Structures are given as C-alpha cells and as structure tokens.
Image (tube, rainbow, N blue to C red):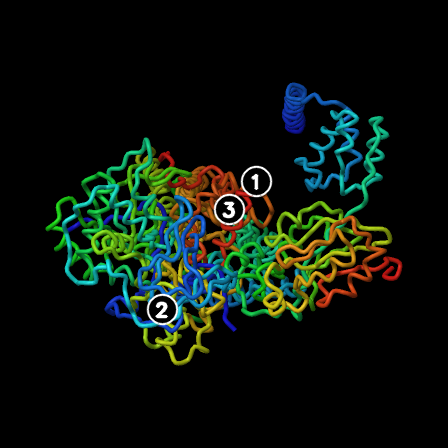
Amino acid sequence: MLKISTAPHLNAPLSTRSIMFNVILALLPTLIAGIMFFGFNALLVVVTSVAGCVAFEYLFCRFVTQTETSTWDLSAVVTGLLLAFNLPATIPLWMVLVGCFMAIILSKMVYGGIGKNMFNPALVGRVFLFISFPVEMTTWIKPQFLNFMSPDAQTAATPLKILKHLSADGSADELPSYFQMFVGNIGGCIGEVSALAILIGFVYLLYKRIISWHITFYYLSSFFILISLHWLITKSPGADPLAHLLSGGLMLGAVFMATDYTTSPMSPNGKIIFAIGCGVLTYIIRIYGVYPEGVSFAILIMNAFVPLIDKLYIPRLFGTARR
Amino acid sequence: MSLIISNILILGGIGLVAAVVLYMVSKKFAVKESPRIKAVEALLPGVNCGACGKAGCHDFAKACAEANTEDFKNLHCTVGGQSTMQKIADLLGYKTAEKDPTVAVLRCQGSCANAPAKFEYTGLKSCRLVSRIATSQSECPDGCNRMGDCVRACKFGALRLDDITGLPVVDENKCVSCGACVAICPKKLFEIRPKGKNGERVYVACRNRQKGAVARKNCLAACIGCTKCTQIHPDIKVQDNLSYIPMNVDASQYGEKLAQICPTGAIVYTGKKEQQS
Amino acid sequence: MIKKKTFSIGGIHLDKHKITAAMPIVDAGLPELVYIPVKQHIGAPAKILVKKGDKVKVGTLLADADGIVSADIHSSVSGEIVKIDEIIDADAYPETMIVIKVEGDEHEPNIDLSPTIISEIPYTPEEIINKVRSSGIVGMGGAGYPTPVKITISEGKKVDTLLINGIECEAYLTADGRLMVEKAEQIIIGARIINKALGIQNAIIAIDENKPEAIEIMSRLTKKYVGVNVCVCQSKYPQGAEKQLIAAITGREVPPGKLPVDVGCIVHNVGTAFAIYEAVQKNKPLYERIVTVTGDDAAEHLGNYRVRIGTPASFLIAKTTQHPEHIGKIIFGGGMMGVSAVNMDAPLTKLTSGILLLNDQDAVKPPEIACIRCAKCLDACPMGLRPFAIASAIKSNDFAELKRLHTQSCIECGSCAFICPARIPLLDYCKLGKIEVKKQQ
C-alpha cells in the first residue's frame, strides 16, 4: 500500500531529543571540571539531581496527567544537570530532591510540560533552595584538584563574596588570580566555577547550531560594559570587571540558562532585548543588591518579560518596509 | 508602629487612586445600549456558533431587538430552538415563525468496510488537507475522508468518529444544526434536514457522481443512479448518476419503501425513534 | 570572482540530495499508451478537438486553450486515440484524459528536429507571443501559469529585468541543472526571445553555486550574447522561489499581495526558456520535458530522462527499479514541495519536474510532539512569518489572529516543517490557515 503525506517529505536531522542530547554533551566538560575540583560529592549531587528530575517527570506523567511519558526527550536530564551545576557540592542530598521537585513539578509540568513553562525550571529549583536553605546553599568548600575523597574539606569564600566585601569595607581575603578563576580553581557551585569548560560547551553548541550567539554575547557584553563603567567611575576594587565576568554563575547562566529555548524570546531582536535586560539586572543585583550573586534572579525576572517581548518584537514581513 | 501606619496609608492611597481612575474610565468609555439587547442576549444560549448567520449571540440579540415584526420571522436561533425563540418573542411582543427542528445528516456510507482504504496517510489528520492530495480514503472522489474535521469543528460535542466504520456519527440529541460541519467538510457531505416526526428521515447517503459501475467499485454503498427510487415518489430526481430525495418526501410514508428498493443501500431510512429510545 | 547573492530573510540549508546531478539526460523511450490530461495548467481545461479513433502525429493539436488563462494541449506521440474519458490522476480524482495508443514515432512535418542552433530572432513580439501560445507552453517550474500571459506586459506595468530561474533549490531534483549544462545556448536564445517579446534589453540567468558545471558553461556562452548575464546565488532553500529570487538579485521585495511585475521583474524557469526556444525557433510544441527520477535507496537506475508528456509514471518507475514493492512513497516533484501520489499509473504532465521514490521508513511522517519554542521555524521562514503562532492559532480556532499573522503571505515552501525539531507539520497548519482566511473573505 502506498503511503502519502503532505509536503515537505523531508525532515532536518535535528529532533528535540537530539537537541537535548547535544546540550548534555555540551555540559559534559563542565561536569568533568566540577568533579575534578569538588570530588566525589559533586558527582553524587549531579546523579541525585538528574535521577530526581527524571523520576519526578516520569511519575507526574504516569499518575497525574496519565499521558505517555515525556522523559524520553531528555529534557529532564538537562534540567537535572543544570540544577546540580547551580548547587554547592556539600549540599545534603534530600535538599537536591526538593530542588528537583520544584524544578520539574512546580516549574515545568504544572504549566503543561516541555515548551509551556514560563520560568527556567533549573533556576526556579535553585532560587527556591537558595531562599529556603541559605546556609547550606552558601557553604563553599575549597576546591581540591583531583582529590576525590576529601574528608576534611576547608570552607572557602567565593570570588563574588570577596568582591562584595571589597566594595563594602575593603577588608577581605585576596582574590584568586584571573587564571585560577578562568580554569575554575575557586569556591562556588559545581558547574559555575570553570569558565573554560563552559566556553568549550558553548563553542560546541554554536558549532552544532543548537543556539545562536546573540543572547550569550549581548548578556555578557552588556554586563561587562556596565560593570566596567562602574569600575572606571568609582574605582571600587569590588567592581573588578574581569573578576565579575569570570566568577559566579554568569558564564553558566549566559551560555546555558538564558539561552533556554522555552524561556527566551523567539525573534532575533527580542533575544537581544532579553539578553541586555539580563545583563542590566545582573549588574544591579550584584552591585547594589544584598546578594552577591544576581544571575539567577536576573534571568528569572527577564523570563517573566518574554511573552511581552514576543508580542512587541516580531520579524519583518517580507515585502514590507524595514523598521 | 509608624511604619505600619505609613504602609497602610500608602497602599490604601494607591488603591483609592486606582479605583477612582477605573471608575472614571468605565463611565467615560461606557457604551450605551438598549436594555432590550441585554435582555434578549440573556435568553440566548451564548455559544456564539454563528448558525443564525450573525457574528455571535450579541449580534443576534441586537438584530432581534432592532427587527420589526416581519424581519423577526426570519430570525431563528437553531441552538435554542423554538422554545428560546418563543421566549424572545414574548419579551419583544412579536410572533415567531413555526420552524421544524432540524438535524445534520452525513450523506456518505464510505465506511472502512464499504470503501476500504487504498493508501496510508501519515501526518496531520485533516480532511481539508488530505482531500487536496488524494480523494477519500478509497478512490471515491466524493467520499468521507474519515479524519474528523467535522468532529473538531462541532462546538456541541454532537459528533464523534465511529471506531469501526471510521465515519462521523451525529448525536441527534446534542446536534443543534448550527451548520459548522456543513461548512467545514471539504466534500460537502453534511446536510441540515428536518428531524422529522418521530425522528423519521429518509435521504440518499451518497454524493458520488461517477457512473454506476465505477461508483460501485469504489464503494459498496454508493448510489449508482439506477433511478428505482424515482418510481416511488415523483419529486425524487437522479442527476449526474446521483439521486437526491427532497425534504418534502414524507419519510414515514415512503421511507421504508425507498430503503428497501435501493439495491446498494445508499438510501438511509432512520426508522421511528421510539424503537431506538 | 562573481559575488554570490541571496535573500535576507530566513531560508534553510538542505542536505546534498542531488544524486543525479552528473547523469546526462537520456531518452525515456515510448510507452504503449499515453494518457494526456486536458488540464495541465492553472485555469480552464482545454477544449478537446479530437475524437476516439482519430490518428494523430507527434505535435498534433489535441485540445484548444479555453480563454486567456489556459493552454493548448498537443499530442506527444503518434498513434490512434483509443479513449477520451475520466481517468484517475495521481491524487485519484478523475480527470478528463485523452488516451493514445502509440504506433511508430511520426512527427508533424513543420517541426524542425535538426540539432542546429538558430540564434537569429526574425520575429516581432506579437509573432513570438502567438507562437508560444500555439505551442501550449506553461511555467515549467511547477506553477503551471500559461506563459503567453507572462510574456505580455499588461497596461500600465513597466518591466526592466528578466530573470531566468536556473536555481534548482528543491531537494533531489536535477532536471534544470542538467538542462543548463546540455542546452545552455538554447536557454540563452530563449531568454533573448522573451526579452524581445517584453521589449527589454537585459536578462539575468540565476544559477546557484552548487552547479559549477552549469555556471562555467553559461558564463562562457553568455559572452557571445549582449544583455544576457549570469548571476551566481548561494545554495539556500527556497532561493528558487520567485519572490526570494527577485530579492536576492535585484534587492527588491515584492510587497504582500503583489506580483513580481509590480517591482519590474519577470521570472521564467530555464525549462520554460528552453521550451520557448524550441517553440519559436523550431516550431516544436511542448510535448516532452526533462524529468528527474531519483530517491535514496528505493530504486537502482536513477537519472534524468527526456519524457513524453502523458507517459505513465509506472513506465518510468519500471525502468528504474525491479522491485516496485519496495517503494513506500511516490512523489511528483521534489522532496520539499512535491505532491505524493496515490496512483502509480498517473501520467507525467508539463509540470512534473521529477519523480522521487522514498522507501518505507522515509515515507512515514514522524509524529508531532510538543513545541519547545526553539524559534527555528521563525528563523527559517523566508517570508518573515511566525509558523508556530499560526499553528497555535489554528489549534485554538482563533481565525482573527490568523489574519493578523499574515498567514496568506505563506509561499508554502515547507522550510518551517522541515526544520522543526518537534516534527510539527507547520506547513499543514499554514495551509489550513490559508483555507480559513480565504473562507472569511
């Protein structure tokens, strides 16, 4: 029997699952860097988070919506990885599972599943944990390179915290060198310390045409320009632009979080507005806010503006005047 | 303490200002409308199906309120039916025109058994699309595509696709003859016909205009244009190898005879409703 | 180095599907019976002039154009008319066709079959238009718009550029590419004939960069002809669409609801230009065309064939494969815009540029899953539309929104549905949207 269908009869090789698979591949260098610096604990957190996210999604599909499970599109794995990357390696594992619940159930599935959520699930999970368990979420251990089983890990301040103190009263630990910050040998969350590993993933995503460079570029550059101006005007050592760029969740956020398809605008111009908004908000929170870190809040706030941006910035219709 | 008071004052102040602005805006931009329209609209079903030929229930209510006695007779809400029109007429002081209740009927019997699929379609299930690249599921050019565009178009849940035959089935009790299925079917298979006394209807359930042998090859229940039915009632005409039974043919009198004489079973006689309950 | 041009909005890059690009055009031979539909164009079906039992030669007029937007139909073989009846076409709808039993291969005496190339054009514009009209030529890119109308400038319009569309951006098809390699000079003369009919001086032959052989031959030959130039465009889909081609080469964009002539351009396919050459210089009506028979693994003997109009597709398919049961889907045209056929015995018409055979796995469309808002459809749409929004407007029956989304501007190129990672049939939704918008007007 002949088969028929409407045109087109061909499909691009990229499917939802292969996109998610490629994102996972792009996250691998960051994962390896995290394990190298924070040891076995980091791996445990990542495995718990991924397993938790997948399990919550599967159970939700099975028992609540009673539809075919959507876990095979691998998006829950990506969420799990990103959530773990935003957590310190020392966090108790039950808190990780709470984060998974917030991320998958409350931020994704109740909106209708993949593609329908307004806010980045991993960031919702992180912010929930950050506000609920501030102590556990801000206890950083000193990275110990390739020391996988370290029983007596020392605590260490993150560069951002040092910067915050610097701008407050000038009395703080010394900042690590830019090179250390670039490689990732600093205190912080599992996945955000190594700018190098994140950039490798970024290049891979660009090469595979999974994401465009717009959001990442405009996010980082708008933030960098603002913080540089601030630094030049106030001469505050706490506004060291390079240190800000390389520390905290900025790189991870700009490459993997702000570029999330579902929670970013669709038109090219909208993407630019969104990214600049993220950059400005991150600057405001980091410099004027109470928290040392502002990336997750900035992205979540801009997520809320996405429907509006999508309405305002639409592509130019062929044959009509350029705007 | 002063913090609490100032908070209350500020929030209360904002609320007050907003309330005043809202009130002024609603007064300034209020649309003046005859209260009759509102009263009529309240009586209507409010589904905005458009079966009356107006843009929606509000539009229909406006037309009713503004109509004179003659115009009003031409207005009819098929969804609400005679009872609703009677209420509106009472309200406005008009008389309604008597209208028989109607129902949509499917003029095709190209089921999976009668007209087996000749190809396999994958992709978006939509009769309107498929009918552009192929005939029906069989090779009958006028048959049902069995993809259910009508089911999705029906706002009253009166249609469903039968699992065995593949054809849409009209739920007589839910159908309000709004005409959505008539409009959406690319093969124009639906027709609004009077429900008939006791639910008795007789109609030709085929639209195939091909020659008898070809039509029969495509579908076992096709009208082959044999003209046998024209001998039963003079108003029944066969045109382009296809018979059509006009609505004035009395189903209770001729229905059974017509169904019996049709050699392919293309004529459908619904029978008395009591038997079906 | 010639600068490679392209359009600015959207577009996608197709994989290399041009399997038959290097295969020379061969004659497909004659089938036993040909089925010639009387409607192979947009507009009214032609009026039949012959009856059952008539003897016809190759090029005999079978049916006469009924009105301006219609085209003559000629016999493609010599033999006896055995039937004039409704016969099911590729989509299984019955169409009126003239069935001719092939006997020998005798041509009408006025047809010049010699291989000499005639470059002199001694005809007036009126004579050219009449010759094109009496040869039954229609736009061979697939639209099927009668060509005489397109080489006549209507009152009040001004045309300054003729574009000859040698861009075969459609997946798999190579018929136009081979034609440009093998009949380059005829196409150039065809372009000059159209120029003369339009009363303008310059013509641009647009070729995409993945046809180096055609570019080389065309660039060499156009030096002999003043006013005819080659323009190389990027290999991007849908570069060959009329509006995108004009935008790429002249930078002018045809406004929504307008025609190319409104921006001073006329576009003709290379196949049409070649047919015009043959009609005007050789008195040869349009009774054969080049058809690519292609596919990844459903058939063995692929190639570019010169086929008589009305040859059943099954005749060509039998030439290419011993195992027709392995074929999952038969597509008339290319992979992006072609129409899948229900009936294997359907005849090839003036508009069939290729037959694409897909195996069982490729024939099935993958199921639709949830949109992840990746915006790839928005980036791909060459018209600047938002296909995902059109799809959701259809799903929620929001027909007013469809109009605001300019659904009627869709050129149905299929880029959105091709690129969608969630495999949402976006083009199907756009087509439904167009049906609904039209219904409202």
The image quadrant of residue C203 is: top left
- Which amino acid type is shown beneath numbered disc 3? Lys
Q: Examine the rendering and report whether any part of residue B194 can be seen.
A: yes
Furthest toward the right, the residue is B274
- Which amino acid type is shown beneath numbered disc 2? Gly
On the same chain, marks 2 and 3? The answer is yes
Residue at 26% in and 41% down: C126
Residue C236 is tagged as: none
* Residue beneath disc 2: C79
Which structural element holds mark 1?
A: helix
Residue C434 is tagged as: 3
State which tag comes first along the sequence, 3 or 1: 3
Q: Nearer the viewer, residue C44 or C384?
A: C44
Which structural element holds mark 2?
A: strand
* Residue beneath disc 1: C440
Vertical arrangement, residue B177 with respect to residue C418, above or below:
above
State which tag comes first along the sequence, 2 or 3: 2
Mark 2 and mark 3: Cα distance apart in space: 44 Å
